[in-house]
Amino acid sequence: MSTPTPTEKDGKKAAKQAKQGNKQQQQQKQGGNKNVTVPTGNQDGISVKKSEDFSQWYQEVVTKGSLIEYYNEISGFYILRPAAMHIWNEIRDWFSAKTRELDVEETSFPMFLSSTSLEKEKAHVEGFAPELAWVTKAGDKDLEVPVAVRPTSEAVMYPYYAKWIRSHRDLPLKLQQWCSVVRWEAKQTTPFLRAREFLWQEGHTAHLTEKLAEEEVLAILDLYADVYEKLLAVPVVKGKKTEAEKFAGGYWTSTVESFIPTNGRGIQGATSHALGQNFSKMFDITVEDPDNKGKHLNVWQNSWGLSTRVIGVMVMVHGDDKGLVLPPRVARTQVVVLPVGITAKTTEEVRKDLHDKIKDLAADLKKAKVWDSKVRVEVDDRDNYSPGFKFAEHEKNGVCLRLEFGPKDAANSVVAYSRRDTGEKGSIPLAEIATQVPALLEKIQEDMYKKAEAAFSSHRLVLSDWEKVVPALDDRNVVIIPSCTEIACEEHIKTITKGDKKELGPDGKLQPTMGMKSLCIPLEQPEGIVPGETKCLNPDCGKDAVKWVMFGRSY
Amino acid sequence: MSTPTPTEKDGKKAAKQAKQGNKQQQQQKQGGNKNVTVPTGNQDGISVKKSEDFSQWYQEVVTKGSLIEYYNEISGFYILRPAAMHIWNEIRDWFSAKTRELDVEETSFPMFLSSTSLEKEKAHVEGFAPELAWVTKAGDKDLEVPVAVRPTSEAVMYPYYAKWIRSHRDLPLKLQQWCSVVRWEAKQTTPFLRAREFLWQEGHTAHLTEKLAEEEVLAILDLYADVYEKLLAVPVVKGKKTEAEKFAGGYWTSTVESFIPTNGRGIQGATSHALGQNFSKMFDITVEDPDNKGKHLNVWQNSWGLSTRVIGVMVMVHGDDKGLVLPPRVARTQVVVLPVGITAKTTEEVRKDLHDKIKDLAADLKKAKVWDSKVRVEVDDRDNYSPGFKFAEHEKNGVCLRLEFGPKDAANSVVAYSRRDTGEKGSIPLAEIATQVPALLEKIQEDMYKKAEAAFSSHRLVLSDWEKVVPALDDRNVVIIPSCTEIACEEHIKTITKGDKKELGPDGKLQPTMGMKSLCIPLEQPEGIVPGETKCLNPDCGKDAVKWVMFGRSY
């Protein structure tokens, strides 16, 4: 099975379709049947099933669910619409508060790097060089020295760390910024997952000792895991990257790795890097050793980043054939309330009564709290759409809970509900909505996580038999196998696990199913590696296994 | 009197000085007297008086007060340090909440504009063209079509407004984004006031009618005035820009104008633009007229922006010879608590008791609230600095209130305080700190505003006699005079109000004192213009006056 990765190509197709749709409506607007109410908004449903054309499905879900608009003017760029920004801001607020508790402060550095700064840290920059966007002109004048838009800010910031850190008393220095960075990818781009500009937070800290730095790397990794698991209801595996996959120029890299059940691909969630003293040597960031007067130490640095990619992972994990399924914790609209059961025969008085009661109900709900925030409720009382049309629209947008209120409900003092995640229906006494709705939202969040966790854990196979590896991949699993963790071995594994089937590659061309690469060395290790006895599972390797390593076909 | 504008030149001088200072310390660190504790942080005081060298003073205050670091790598760019980001985030949180009440939602558009989009709205773009930063290369490949970094986002966004607005039911559309924009100024740059990259919020909205759009322009203007007056304690005058000064491509522009008493300059605070239908015609943003089926209307648009310039204005208005004076509402540290009266004779027991009590005191204070936030308290118990050294440092950083606690205070169960704004000293019973400190902070905020308001209103002269205008400007006033409000007249006024003295101009060269330009047509008009009778005050004009217009030498 080889569900292809959603690509830019599909994006263009969809943008074209959208344009055509737009044109049709324009025509309707400008002439056409005047008795027909032209529906507005993204009224088209998702045209393909998630299991049948994942790529097209993803692209439709993020655009029709109003998270993303393709920026047609420049390829590889996307517009984040309010529903996406809401999710990002929920994450931002949560993560800012948590990092403030760790004494991390916010800063804002310029978006440009001079070519001279780049010289300083070639090893690190080499990886980014092909993707740097260069400003060479201002107005109609050529710049004397071209400047690059930051792909990440180590080289922008660290000269100032050298200036600001004058003594061990200035340590730790812990700064982060929320900004966008630019990586002019040659590869096919995909909304959220791979874009030429994306939003992220980047933390950059300096510490006196390796131990203090290491503690922070893992504390941040825990926060990243919480962003996925607690906010987005997406399970992750925490681990370290192997040498082959660690951050260029760093010491070691920790990561949270997630999983897309539909195509069995692993996907890197966020990384927290121990930079060691590599950068502090390049940028001359030293302090006098407090325990050894006169001797100087290079500081120990970390950098860590989480980007809007998280939103893409969340969409892929939870979405279904009707569209987005958003976890209540981050959804802009948690609850929609709408009138039902109104017919041509319904009297004006009954209509008015229904509308008034819906208003009251929504007002009560808005005062209720869930996760220390007010419940986010919308009333949809548009009278130019049928309830069925509205149901589909709110489902596509991933609204977590639908409350329907009709004359019968009014008579019984209840409201009917429908859960977006399971479709489960039921009714709630009006007197209890302020407690039952928050409880339902919490239940939805919990159930979404449980479902995703079951999917990931059942597709994460611990294998000690090489023969089972490729079939497991073909069955959309990732595998955890004994490994020597060496670079050459991983390269070889990538080659020998390529499949026979053809699939769309990241460059948009058909190619053999990709080989697997290492995702991480899970912090939580299975048992069974006997030192000096257990061998690396790669049949052509022969070295001793040192760790269980999670491998998979991946984004 | 002609206090020059702080310029980049001074910035460079200071950066050089800082570097030298750094070097000295580096030498101290690396060799030097081992018994001397090397002070860390920005320990140098402000070297000049605000009234004597305003330019140098400003530059020292923003750097030594740790708001700004000059980005030496690329001229005209600045690093916003945590104390500055705290102020900006206070503004952001407040303004976001207020605009959410107006149903404005957050979005994030790409930072790049294609040259093709720019073609569409030449009139508007012409003003920005000389300042556009052009990306022409990605990696080592030339881009087929160069892209410019946004100087503002009308041309980035409005093609999508045309796509999203399909019916009058999609109106109003109200979006804003918080981002940075780039304007590669040829003029001398100044931290916060004129930088080549700066942070701002930009709101872009579309409405069905002129009236609805106009209401919003003024509602936003009120919020901008509140940012200055309520958060930053800086008084402003609300008004409309004259034709000569309005936004390129817009319909009319409203503005809040502030004033720097030290040099008598006016300064534009923030602008809220009615774009009319100009852009909706360029970008073809239309809906069917709900009152006239089949007929199409161009939507009415607004755009409005507030940038980190606000922080610079605040610094200039409130700062004094000791450094920053920050309004408590936005200060990162509102209160610092420190031990005093410890001598060589103080016993370990007394020291410990003092430290414990200070901790308790700070813990109590941190639970107290002011303006619905927790009081922001720091304890400074570093024992390698004298109290006097610490006092100076916290004063330079603008900490609003200093609490001193020594053995005598402990004995009397009081804490001594010193206000940063007035220097006023007093004492507070320990039992009352949780109520008295918030009350004092509110009083400081109020007094800072009153003082600044008195300075502005006493320097805002309503004149009906042309002979008094230039002397008034020379005396560091702005003037409100009867005007025909026409472009040619303003041009002429600018010429005939140039002074004889030389001063540093915005290009860093000595030039005659600048002429005055119109700042705004105040919404609150003085009385006395008799239609058909009162003449424009420009002696060479002769036309009828239509409005009182505020003129001044300005930033």
Image (cartoon, coloured by chain):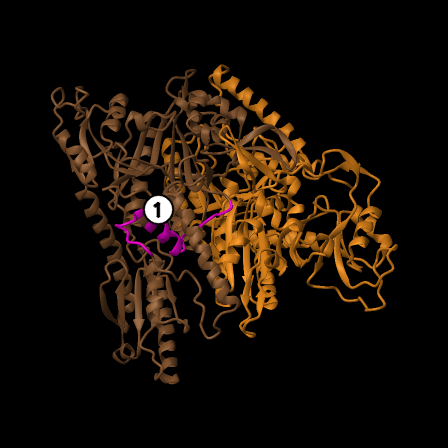
Chain colours: A orange, B brown
Name the amino acid type tagged 1: Gly
Position of B460 relative to A275 (above/below):
above
Number of numbered discs: 1
Specify the quadrant of the image occupied by residue A279. Answer: bottom right
- Residue hosting label 1: B312
Q: Which quadrant holds residue A42?
A: top right
Estimate the x, y position of residue B261 in percent, counting from the top left. 24, 45
Image quadrant in which the N terminus of chain A is located: top right
Magenta region, residue range: B47-73
Q: Is residue B69 visible?
A: yes
| Left or right, residue A332 beside residue A193 | left
Q: Is residue A331 visible?
A: no
Where is residue A72? Give x, y as percent: 57, 29
User: Could you say whether the residue bearing mark 1 is in a helix, strand or loop?
Assistant: helix
Q: Quadrant of residue A294?
A: bottom right
Neighbour tally class for label 1: few under 14, some 14-19, many 20 plus, Cα within 10 Å? some
Please state which of residues A256 and A546 is positioned toward the viewer in this rendering. A546
- Is A138 placed above or below A272 here? above
- Quarter holding the C terminus of chain A is top right
Is residue B170 positioned above or below A98 on the image?
A: above
Return the x and y of residue B179 as percentages of the image width and height: 47, 41
Residue at 45% x, 35% y is: B183
Residue B19 drawn at (x, y percent):
46, 55
Is B142 on the left or on the right of A418, as rendered? Answer: right
Tell me the chain of label 1. Answer: B
In this picture, residue A148 sits left or right of residue B210:
right
Give the camera-side residue of A59 and A162. Answer: A162
Q: Is residue B49 magenta?
A: yes
Residue A407 magenta-highlighted: no
**In this view of the protein, which residue sits in the foreground, A213 or A60?**
A213
